[in-house]
Image (tube, rainbow, N blue to C red):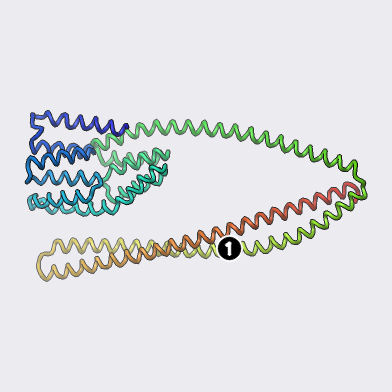
Amino acid sequence: MKKSILGVYIAFAIFGNLATANGQSNSYANCIDQAEAALSAGLYPDCLAKAKQAMTLKPAGWEAQRYAAKATFYLDRPDEARAFLTKAIAKAPKDKQTALRFGFKDIATLELLLPKISAARKLAKGDQHRESAAIFVSCVEILPDRLDWSISAAYEYMAAEAFDDARATLQNVVARNDGPVGNKAQRMMTSLATAEADSKKKKQALEQQQQQEAAAKTAAENQRLDDARRAAADAQRAQDAVTQKSQKKKDIADEIAALKVKRDAQAAVVSGLESEMSSADMEVESKSSRIRSAERSVKDGERYVENAEERLQQAEENLRQTTSGAARAIATYAYNQAKSSVDSWKQKLEQRQEKLEEAKAAKEESTKARQVVKDRLDQAKRSLNTIDQRIESANDRLRQIGG
């Protein structure tokens, strides 16, 4: 709601001023100025509307097509952006066309990133705010002009109460934009400070409540244990009073003999499980070694891909600058070789990443299997300790009656 109200306010301020300037709100130039102002303010639907209005006023104008391409780019509509950009290039002067063509690269990148952005928004709806923010940030690293994604990341960090991350994200927006988007980030930082203070107060109150509850629970548990120990002692004394000494000695002796047999069997179980645990530890370490090896392989692959892409960019630049026949053929061959190298290394990188995921999955299975063995071993040890305690208790009782 706050974001919507802010958008209406900015739109009124921009278009109210522009519409009254010189009384020419419907001229082509004025529409272009308003489209540019809306784009700077992050009001992309308004920018698109003004660009389309300009197209009707001057169908041959390339600037309207350019702003329509920019607006649909920021509205995450790459097909429309590409169509508008194509028309802009066709209508623009030749000295403007080269610069405009670079927009195709950003549109292609946007198409690749849109599934991630969709996933980030889905995570946000599922209250997985930190994960959502991380995706927005990673996408901005690829498309730095999408500061609206940085704003989304800041919102998600704030929802996750990751205030330092939110603050750093907003500071980056402010540093990169001194216009309406940067101003919005400044206002968000003010809200962030208030939210952070409220969160700290709530956490402190919760911690204090938990400490009080824990203290009360500990006191109650201690009282219960004291009561239980007193009741057990009273019962033992009552039994001693009515039981013949000789019968008690026999019963205790039989009990100890049975417990020793049970202890020997349980000790054998513990020994076997300890052997299994040792094997499980070795298996987990083996899988960990595979993961480390696979991670190194992936890092090497990423470095090879990066180097290949740099060579491809250089080859592309050489091809763009080369016009003569023979030299251009050589440059074309170098470009194709570089592109083939990039594709090859990307395929190898994917294979290495798959191996890494397989190694991780194998380690996870081994870790689960080890945990099963550990749980069984812990249970077996607890059972053995219980038997020892019972034997020691029986010996104590036997000594108490003179056995």
Q: Is residue 348 left or right of residue 74?
A: right
Quarter residue 192 falls in: top left
Number of on-image labels:
1
Q: Amino acid at mark 1?
A: Ala
In the depicted structure, whether residue 332 falls above or below residue 80: below
What residue is rendered at 36% in x and 32% in y? 191
- Residue under label 1: 280
The one of 205 and 367 positioned closer to us in this rendering? 367
Query: In which quadrant will I find the N terminus?
Result: top left
The one of 150 and 75 positioned closer to us in this rendering? 75
Q: x, y (%) of residue 231?
A: 79, 38
What residue is rendered at 13% in x and 67% in y? 328
Q: x, y (%) of residue 35?
A: 16, 39
In the depicted structure, whether residue 161 falls above or below residue 256: above
Q: Is residue 145 left or right of residue 293?
A: left
Q: x, y (%) of residue 400?
A: 88, 46
Badge 1 element: helix
The one of 360 and 78 positioned closer to us in this rendering? 78
What residue is rendered at 42% in x and 34% in y? 196
Q: x, y (%) of residue 77?
A: 23, 47
